[in-house]
Amino acid sequence: MGIELHTKFRLLHAALCFLSIVILLVLGVTNLSRDQPPPWIFLAPLIILCLAFILSTVFCIVRVVIRVNFPVVGFAAHGLASVLYAAAATILLYAFIFLPKSPLFTTKEKLHPAGTCANFNLESASCTENWDSCQKHITYCHDRMEALTRGGINPDITPKSMVIVDISLAYICMLTAFIGAYFAYEDYQDSEYEEESMDGEGAAGGSGGTRQCYTLGRANLEHSPKPSQMV
């Protein structure tokens, strides 16, 4: 027996959800500082997407590997997954619109032995030994500060682009799960119709057998000789 259409949609949105989780993890590792706890706009969608992925993956394993099909439970799982996808996408969209200065959307500053851009020591040993490296870092800090001041593209284009992709993937997962829920409900309706048809055929067969016995009994009575004919 082949895989149902709603299971194929489940496989699709589980794969897209995994891709969304990977992008969000890369974004967090690249931009967030390890010295500070991750912000809620990173943890909340990540946890929600992980829950949705686990839910979808478990039902994929149950259906594809174990070969068990529960259309009603599958419909509920699709619906719950779509709600989780929508919640994660909405949180990221809210952060993208109303919290543009969050560390999640700004690339981390490059490290240099002479210090940070705010506290750069030109008289350090690293600058004395390698002046070209210090000059390049000073140029980098200058360009970075200008870009941050004018809200330019330089430090923000990569993280914001990744967030936009992540939001789009989450909403696509939501739509895919919603479509999968529709097909799971249709599968449930078909299974209910088949059960009713089988029950109806069984009842009809039983009554038909009763009528047949009654007809045969009546035929025997009709063909039995009457008392007047026995003389």
Image: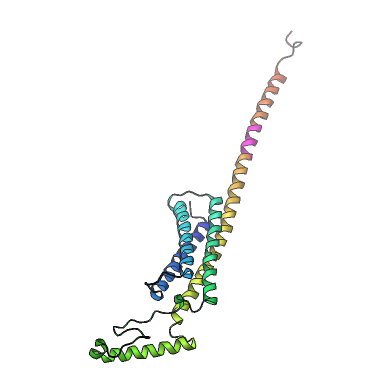
Which residue is farthest top?
A: 231
Q: How many marks?
A: 0
Q: Quick one: quadrant of the C terminus?
A: top right
Q: Position of residue 203 (x, y in %)?
A: 64, 36
Left or right of 49: which side holds 183?
Answer: right
Camera-side residue of 200 and 34: 34
Residue at figure coordinates x 49%, y 60% from the top left:
52
In the rendered image, residue 150 lying in the magenta stretch gets the answer no
Against 207, residue 5 (above or below) is below
Instruction: Magenta stretch: give its range.
Output: 200-207
What kind of secondary structure does the magenta stretch mostly adopt?
Answer: helix
Q: Position of residue 90 (x, y in %)?
A: 55, 69
Left or right of 117: which side holds 102?
Answer: right
Against 146, residue 78 (above or below) is above
Residue 143 position by quadrant = bottom left
Which residue is farthest right?
A: 228
Q: Position of residue 46 (x, y in %)?
A: 46, 66
Q: Position of residue 113 (x, y in %)?
A: 29, 83
Left or right of 168: which side holds 206?
Answer: right
Can residue 12 be seen?
A: no
Against 180, residue 122 (above or below) is below
Camera-side residue of 176 and 115: 115
Can residue 9 be seen?
A: yes
